Amino acid sequence: MAQAHADADKYYIPHSSPWPIYGSITLFTLMSGAIATLDGWLPAYALIPGFVMLALLFVFWFHTVIAENQAGIYNMAVDRSFRMGMMWFIFSEVMFFAAFFGALFYARNFSVPWLAGDGVKIFSKLLLWNNYDGVWPTNGPGVVGGKADGTFEIVPALGLPALNTAILLTSSVTVTIAHHALLTGHRGRLKIFLALTFLLGFTFVGFQAFEYHEAYTELGLRLGTGIYGSTFFMLTGFHGMHVTVGAIMLTVIWFRVMKGHFTPKRHFGFEAVAWYWHFVDVVWLGLFTFVYWL
Amino acid sequence: MAYAQANDTAHHDDHHDQPATGIKRWLFATNHKDIGTMYLVFSLIMFFIGGAMAMVIRAELFQPGLQLVDPVLFNQLTTNHALVMIFGAVMPAFVGLANWMIPMQIGAPDMALPRMNNFSFWILPFAFTLLLSTFLVPGGAAAGGWTLYPPLSLQTGDSFPMLIFAIHMMGISSIMGAINVIVTIMNMRAPGMNLLRMPLFTWSWLITAYLLIAVMPVLAGAVTMLLTDHFFGTSFFNAAGGGDPIMFEHIFWFFGHPEVYIMVLPAFGIISEILPTFSRKPLFGATSMIYAIASIAFLSFIVWGHHMFVDGMPLAAQLFYMMSTMLIAVPTGVKVFNWTATMWRGSLSFEPPMLFALAFLFLFSIGGFSGLMLAIVPADFQYNQTYFVVAHFHYVLVPGAIFGIMAGVYYWLPKWTGHMYNMTLAKAHFWLSAIFVNVLFFPQHFLGLAGMPRRIPDYAVQFTDWNMVSSIGGFFFGASQILFAIVVVQCARGGKKATSIVWEGTHPTGLEWTLPSPAPYHSFSTAPEIP
């Protein structure tokens, strides 16, 4: 994209780019590694090439985009395209989480009460699961997973999860302060509060890992602990992955700030990451309310 | 604001205005026309692969008893025929048309996010390599139907993760393609191209893209739950653990029903472009057409339960899904009425795109009517899982979606290649397709009403006659599609020069007709004046 020029009047269209096809090969490699691992054809090392290629993909592709951006060849129209693209990407992420929240609500409002003989389903109780009372949290009438006796404990909302809520909410405040500092040109404050944000993010992930360890070793709460374990770990797990990715994104942005990138007027990269961070924050509030608390 | 290709300036008057040469042009493409072409070619290849599976299915069903394939392979073929046709043929064809036409219709230089555009295309060949190689691994391909209902789908062999990850890749591709379409339409319109002046094809794609972004992630979630149930011991669809296999159907059809409209709304848009041109009249009720598409899209989110009437659903839910489904007939009726009114007292001529558009109008309506029959709960109790359902969705997908795509290709092909195609051959293709698609699918209504179940390789002898008729229709329909490939290839290689308006004697609306044929490599380097 060296042939690009700095005429900000024109909508920039790259002439040609190797990263998309490289990205497709990366995805294929990653998926093939996962398939080979899951089917037991190869040990889990088969995943390594895909992940290495993925990391390189991000480095290469973002390097190109950041270099183009620093060269000033993106005009406001390109900037708008990026913004809209990011918003719709976040919307697609919201819908992905909606599927898992839907599963949680369906289990709590329909499948578990039905298994316990709610309404016209009384016969399934009489014939199949006579002793099942369907009280949430549950690992089902078949007592799937849990400790040796089939029981399990849940993570109380008012412990680590409440602390994690405070951490994420605080990080949302710090990223907003950083944004305002960027808008008003206070680079020092920007650096500090952005660093604070990703540190809080990684702290969250650390606490989450500790909580998972407790759940697996002490509480008998595992991915395979019936529907409660399934929804708990899939929802918090995907959220934790998103927090990790978001914190890495914040770190990258922080390094860019340290290099002097972003101006009060032009800082799409910063804003995109901030939006993403608010998105994981909002998802967490849903998780805290419906998974841990209620 | 002036738009331009990055290289399209006086001080860069080198070869960059021209496409790159060789394989790099395609591998590293960022041009919307190149990417659109790749999408369309890919979709045609998938159409023939999926079609070949259908030919085996129809050959097996030519007479009762087991002739050609064993039942397991038969089930694998029905499952993968659907997956290939839906995700490989129909959806990429529409994305290809979107890539070609949306920048030209809104006066833009290209798609808004060209690199992501190429990424979303190149994922597809890899995804389908995965999907098609499921036939080669121990346990064979998925055989539980394209809807992947657990617990049956969880019994798939080694190909199970291949199937799931192939679907993930298709989803990633679709979401990126849809984001690109929305951003292009919202951000790249030429000055003066306000939303209500936008051509109907672009409008239909704007709404389709919204549907795609809303539901593809839900499908990804559903198949992820299948994957973890299979490999990591989760209990989403396991009643013993407190889950419910029916829950999968809810999540799947929350995706699946909007998906149905994803496959037909762009066809609505294409038909709304073609009928006015060859009727030499403006589209009747153009604004109401837009509202109708939007209403259909909205309703598509609240009707999914009609796929599951026999699952043991509360009566109130059955009534809700029945009523909301029948409500879709209202905006669809508006569209059919407006298309008909567009032709009323028009000066009609019957070029190949018009022929396909007319066939669409009649035959899609048949599919719509059988859909209304299926929406009625007590009637659905009888039709469910019979060939009537097969007939219904093939009527909306083949003479609906596929004819819409073919109409679009025949309409815009001269604009793309700069050559007119062989009209005689194209008309032959139309008549053979239109006749044999009915020979193929209409008898399946009778078979279903008489009680023949779907997804079986063998059947009771009383169903023989209509199955033979259907198979004969299928073979001729399949063979006549070769004509389509011939017409397209011939047209790409040469032929009578097309003018910029292509369809002489008509007044097609839309900015694409202000460009020369073939359209220049970069559609609108500077934003056009909107008349």
Image (tube, coloured by chain):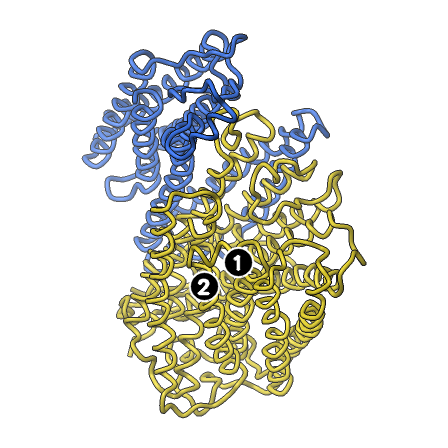
Instruction: Say which residue appears at 41% left-offset and 87% top-offset.
Output: B279
Earlier in the chain: of badge 1 and badge 2, it is: 2
Q: Specify whether residue A137 is in view.
A: yes
- Is there any visible trace of residue B25 in the rendered image? no
* Disc 1 target residue: B383
Q: Are marks 1 and 2 on the same chain?
A: yes
Mark 1: few/some/many CA within 10 Å (<14, 14-19, 20+):
many
Residue A211, compared with residue A273, is above or below; it is above
Q: Which residue is mark 2?
A: B373
Question: In the figure, the blue chain has which letter?
Answer: A
Q: Secondary structure at mark 2?
A: helix
Q: Are marks 1 and 2 in contact (CB under 8 Å)?
A: yes
In the picture, one chain is yellow; tell me its letter.
B
Vertical order, A246 against A27 (above or below): above
| A44 or A253: nearer the viewer | A44
Foreground residue, B373 or A148?
B373
Instruction: Please report, as a chain letter, where disc 2 is located.
Output: B
Residue at the left extreme, as displayed? A184
